[in-house]
Image: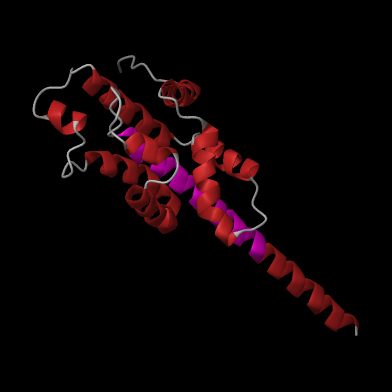
Amino acid sequence: MTNVKQVRSQEVEQAAREALTSRGILIDDIAAIVFEMQYPYNDQLKLEDCVTSVDRVLEKREIQHAILVGIELDRLAERKMLSEPLQTLVETDEGLFGVDETIALGAALGYGSIAVTTYGHLDKHKIGVIKKLDTKRSEHVHTFLDDIVASIAATASSRLAHRLRDAQDRISRDEQVRRDEEDRLS
């Protein structure tokens, strides 16, 4: 067996976080989108909860890999280092070029149908920093990054939605146990 170099999980996570930061994306930017998406369903939600959820999502390899691949392709396109016609497709964010969405959607799949539908909504409506990234007014290429940020926000939103339901279920179970105990004692 040959010695194959393995990249440690912590290195991958750190590289993904640094890649986002290097492109001007902060966890708080993504958390603001998560808050906007989830507050209508949970008026007790705090921005800190959204920051925590984004942080947890960034610990997942699927998300990290999407970040690293997408940002690298955007960077290569900025430096005109992709071969044609890929260079033009990525540089211009060609409307029929769906690989950016495919990578982002693939990363969201691990968080269930809520993440997938939320991603679709964010991809269509371009909320928060996603809109800024999608606007083609700079020397930067964000063909992949806007979709990746939408994927992270969608998965963090899904994570919060599932956690809220779990908490509601626990409360309902606890309430039923309390009622059963009262009935037994009466």
Q: Which residue is drawn at 49% across and 35% down?
A: 58
For the image, the number of numbered tags is 0
Q: Which residue is drawn at 38% across and 36% down?
A: 132
Compared to residue 75, the image places residue 142 above or below, namely below
Q: Is residue 49 magenta?
A: no
Give left or right: position of 48 versus 149: right
Q: Residue at x 31, y 36 (%)?
A: 135
Q: Can residue 12 be seen in this view?
A: yes
Residue nearer the viewer, 91 or 179? 91
Q: Is the magenta stretch mostly helix, strand or loop?
A: helix
**Residue sitting farthest toward the front:** 137
Give left or right: position of 122 versus 28: left
Give left or right: position of 21 versus 55: left
Residue nearer the viewer, 20 or 113? 20
Give left or right: position of 111 versus 143: right
Whole-percent x and y of residue 42?
61, 58
Q: Which residue is drawn at 44% across and 24% down?
A: 12
Whole-percent x and y of residue 18?
46, 21
**Residue sitting farthest toward the left:** 84
Image quadrant in which the C terminus is located: bottom right
**Residue sitting farthest toward the bottom:** 186
Q: Is residue 148 visible?
A: no
Whole-percent x and y of residue 149?
41, 38
Q: Quadrant of residue 55?
A: top right
Residue nearer the viewer, 57 or 49? 49
- Report the magenta residues as a range: 144-168
